Image: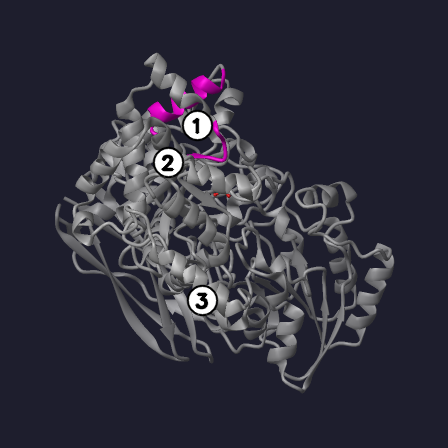
Amino acid sequence: MKMLCSLAVVASLISLPALAATPAAQLDNKPAFIAGLIKKMTLEEKIGQLRLISIGTEMPQPRILQEIAAGRIGGTFNTVTPSENRPLQDAAVKHSRLGIPIFFAYDIVHGHRTVFPISLAQASSWDMDAIALGARTSAIEASADGIDMTFAPMVDISRDPRWGRTSEGFGEDPHLVSEIAKVTVRGFQGTSAANRDSLMASVKHFALYGAVEGGRDYNTVDMSPMRMYQDYLPPYRAAIDAGAGGVMVALNSINGVPATSNTWLMHDLLRKDWGFKGVTVSDHGAITELVRHGVAQDNREAARLAIKAGIDMSMHDALYLQELPGLIKSGAVSIREIDNAVREVLGAKYDMGLFHDPYRRIGVAANDPADVNAESRLHRAAARQVARASMVLLENRNQTLPLKKSGTIALVGPLADSQLDILGSWSAAGVARQAITLRQGLRDVAGDKVRVIYARGANITNDERIVEYLNYLDTDNPEIIQDKRSPADMIAEAVKVAEEADVIVAAVGESRGMSHESSSRTRLDIPASQRALLEALKATGKPLVLVLMNGRPLELTWEQAHADAVLETWFSGTEGGHAIADVLFGDYNPSGKLPVSFPRSVGQIPTYYNRLRVGRPFVEGKPGNYTSQYFEEKNGPLYPFGYGLSYTDFDVSPITLSAPAMARKGKLDASVTVRNTGARDGETVLQLYIHDEAASVVRPEKELKDFRKVALKAGESRTVRFTLDEDDLKFFNARLQHVAEAGQFAVQIGLDSENVQQAVFELR
Ligand code: BGC
C-alpha cells in the first residue's frame, strides 16, 4: 500500500506544468527569464509573490493550499519535513496558473535536527572552522528536510546583556561578529545557494536591533551615525559581501524611523551603497506595527511606507495583499515599485535553484525519511566538537578541574538533567529527548570508577510569576516544570548528596526561555532559588564546580568569590552533556574566550571593551574624585572580552615589529612568540588590538583587528606573525568617510582584551 502511494506521487510529479518544465536554455539568462515571467503575471499574482506566511499560525492547511494555488503566497516558513512541504509546492507548481514555485524558510539559527551550541557560545570558540561546520551541517540537515532559506545569521551586535536575544547573536565586537557573519553565510550557502544541500542565508535583523534601549526587546534605537558605521553596521555588511541572498529587516526604529519604513536604510545604504542584490523580508508582523510605531495612520499607509522603503516581502501579515491593489489604483504606489519587489523575490527563488527544480530539496516521496528524527539523521560528532570548543573556563582555583575519573561526584542543580534547556532558544527541529544532559554526559564519559549521585537541589526559580511568564507561550507544553517539594527539602537532599561526594558539580543558570526573544531581564544574577542552593553547597566545604548554562553574560561576583571552578557552557545543544563532561574530565582542554564582557553589576552596563576614550578616565588603583567611575564598587567588567582560561598556561612574548612605521598601502608585521608553559597540550586565542593614539575624532580605547587560535603541545612555543595594513587603521570620521589618519598607533597582542603586550608604530 505504501509503495503504491509513493508511486502515485512519483507519477504525478512527471506531469509538471509549463514553468517547472522550463527548458534549461531559457533559464540560462536570469534577468531575461525573470523579466519574461513578470510580463506574464497579473497584479494579483505579483502581490501574491510578496507574501510570506507562517504555517500553523495564520490559516488552516486547506486554506493555505487554496491560497498558494491562487498565486497568493510567495513563500512559507515553519514547516520542517519534505512531506509537509511537498503538497504546498504541488499547489504552487501544479495548480497555480503560472506554476511559480514557493520557497520554504525556517529559523535555523544554531542547528536544525542536530542542535549546535547557541550562537553566543559558538562565538566563544573563536574557531571559524568550527562555526562553519555548524552552519554547513545545519544546511545539510535542513535542505534534506525540504527547506530552502534560513532566517540567519543573526549578527546584531549586543552590548546590553539585559536583552534576551544576546543569546542569538555573536557578541559585542564588530570584527569578531563580522568574521563569523562571513563564515556562517558561506556555511549555509556552500558554493552556491542553488545547491541541493544549501540554504539561502537571510541575515538579520537589519539593522541595529541589538542596541534597543535598556535591553528592552523591540524598543527604540537612537544612535550616532559614527557609532552605527563603526560598530553596528559592519557585520550585516560582511554577511552581504559574503553573498547572503536575503536580508530580514529589524523591528526597531532607528533614530526615529522604523527600520521597516526606512528608505535610507534599505534604498540608500543597503542597495545603493552596499550594492545588495537580494531579497528583503520584513520581520514578523512588522508592517502592521508601523501603525503602532505611530508613523502610519492606518494599514494602508503602513503598506505604502513599507513597499516604498524597500520591503520586498511582508512576513506574517496580509497588508500587502489587502492594501497594495488599492494603493496602485490610487497611484500612491507604482507598478514599477511592485515589479521591483517581485523581481527580487523571483530572483531569490532563481538563486535557490527553484526554477530549475522546485523539488530539489523536497525530493520524491519515495525517499522521504521513515522517521524524520532518526538517529542516523543527526550529526552528533560535529555538534560535540563545536560544543567543546565553545566553553569558557572562567575560574579554576587549585586546579579543581579537570576532575579525576575516580571517586564520587555530587551532581546538583535544576539544569543538570534538563534536556530542553540545554538546547537553548531557537532550537529549530531539534528534539529534546535526543539531547544529552550533563547527567547523561557524565555517566557516559566518566567510566566505571566514578560514582555520580544526583539531586536537583532547586527549581530554576521559586518566583511563580516568572514561571508563568516563561510558560505562557505554550501552556500545553510548559517549559518549566516545578518540583513541588519545598526549597528547603530540595536543598537538604542536595547537601546530603554533596556530603557523600569528593566534589560538587552544580549546573545552574537560566532556563532557555530566560534568554530568548522577548526575555529582557532587569537582573542578571543567578535566580535566588539557585543561589540559596549554592550557598548551602558551599557551606559543606567540598570543592564546588559551577557549570553555568545561560544565554547572556550573568552577574557572577558571588560565584567568582566562592566557587572553586566555573565553566561557562552557555546552552550547548544536542551533544552538550557529552561536551561538558569532556571538558570537566580534561578529555578536552577548554579553549573558549568570551565574545562579550561580563559586568560586575547591572548598574555598570554597558561594559563593552571597545568604549570611546574620555577626558577623565578612571585609572585602576588610583581612586579619586572627578574621574569617570562608579564609587560604590570596583569598576570595569568582572570578566573582560576575550577572557578564558585553560588547563595549561600560555605566555606571550613582547611584540616584534617588522618596522617602526607603516607607509600608506604598505604593510607591517607584528610578531609574538606564544609558549605553552604548562604540562598539558592546549589551545588559546591570540588577539590583536589597535589603539589609535590621536585622531580627528574620539577613538576607542582599543579595537580587535585580528585573532588566531593556536594549538600548542605542553612546552611548545611558536612565533605567530600578524600582518597589518592601512585598512586595519581605518575608521569612520565625522563626515562618515572611512579613513586612516597618519600618526601613532599601538598594536596590542594578548590572550584577552586587558592582558596584552604593546608596541608602537607610526602610519606615515
Ligand atoms: C523574530 C525573527 C524570526 C521571525 C520568524 C520574529 O519574531 O524576530 O528573528 O526570524 O520571528 O520566526
Query: What sort of colour scheme is used for the picture?
Result: one colour
Residue contact between numbered discs 3 and 1, judged by CB atoms under 8 Å:
no
Element assignment for label 2: helix
Residue 512 shows in this picture = yes
Residue most extreme to the top? 330
Residue 698 placement: quadrant: top left
Mark 3 surroundings within 10 Å by alpha-carbon count, few (fewer than 14), some (14 through 19), many (20 or more) = some
Residue 388 is one of the magenta-drawn residues: no
Residue 49's tag is: 2
Which amino acid, mark 3? Ala
Q: Amino acid at mark 1?
A: Leu
What number of labels is visible? 3
Which residue, given by chain and number where applicable, does mark 3 sit on? Answer: 366
Quarter of the picture holding the C terminus:
top left
Three-letter amino acid code at the position of disc 2? Gln
In the image, residue 311 lies in the stretch drawn in magenta: yes
Q: Earlier along the polypeptide chain: callout 2 or callout 1?
A: 2
Q: Is residue 717 above or below residue 550?
A: below
Q: Which mark is residue 321?
A: 1
Front disc: 2 or 3: 3
Query: Which one is nearer the viewer's eye here, 633 or 482?
Result: 482
Quarter of the rendering occupied by the N terminus: bottom right
| Quarter holding residue 38 | top left
Circle 1 residues within 10 Å: few <14, some 14–19, many ≥20: many
Determine the secondary structure under disc 1.
helix
Eyeballing the image, is 684 above or below 659?
below
Mark 2 or mark 3: whose residue is earlier in sequence: 2
